[in-house]
């Protein structure tokens, strides 16, 4: 992530610091919250069906350590938002 908003500028236009905010988004049926390593067990359970991973760029985690590693790598990639969805 850029150290300052000025360093994050693209084409001469400053990028709002809100771009990097990680809010909790709550709707009528779903709650989206920032992904954390503590969600690894849930990811492993929810992703148990190999068909889910067919067209994803990540391989299906086979154990808790692999799920934690997947989340750690996702969080390190600041060009993507890593969120967890939970039915309400």
Image: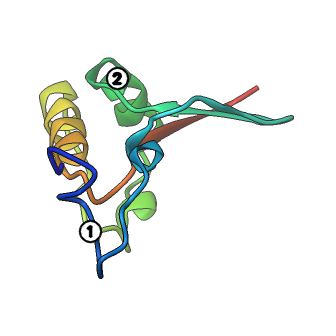
Farthest residue, direction bottom: 11
Residue designated by label 1: 57
Residue 87 quadrant? top right
Q: Which of marks 2 and 1 is in front?
A: 1
Q: Residues within 10 Å of mark 2 (few under 14, many from 20)?
A: some
Residue 28 quadrant? top right
Q: Position of residue 73 (x, y in %)?
A: 15, 45
Q: Where is residue 75 in the image (x, y as percent from the top left)?
A: 24, 41
Q: Position of residue 33 (x, y in %)?
A: 53, 30
Above or below: residue 6 compared with residue 37: below
How far apart are the alpha carbons under marks 2 and 1? 20 Å
User: Which residue is at a point 20% across and 46% down the rendered structure image?
Assistant: 4
Quadrant location, the C terminus: top right
Instruction: Tell which circle, 2 or 1, labels the residue nearer the N-terminal end.
Output: 2
Q: Position of residue 81 (x, y in %)?
A: 39, 50
User: Which residue is at a point 15% across and 37% down the rendered structure image?
Assistant: 66
Q: Marks 1 and 2: in contact by CB < 8 Å?
A: no
The image's mark for residue 41 is 2
Q: How crowded is mark 1: few (under 14 residues within 10 Å), some or many (20 or more)?
A: few
Pick whichever, 27 or 54, lies toward us.
Answer: 27
**Local secondary structure at mark 1:** loop
**Local secondary structure at mark 2:** helix
User: Which residue is at a point 37% across and 24% down the rendered structure image?
Assistant: 39
Pick whichever, 84 or 66, lies toward us.
Answer: 84
Pick whichever, 44 or 20, lies toward us.
Answer: 20
Residue 68 quadrant? top left
């Amino acid at each position: 992530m850029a150290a300052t908003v000025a360093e994050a500028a693209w084409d001469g236009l400053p990028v709002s610091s809100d771009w990097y905010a990680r809010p909790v988004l709550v709707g009528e049926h779903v709650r989206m919250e920032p992904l954390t390593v503590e969600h690894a067990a849930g990811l492993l359970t929810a992703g148990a069906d190999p068909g889910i991973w067919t067209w994803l760029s990540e391989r299906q985690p086979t154990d808790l350590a692999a799920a934690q590693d997947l989340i750690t790598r996702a969080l390190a990639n600041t060009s993507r938002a890593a969120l967890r969805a939970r039915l309400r």
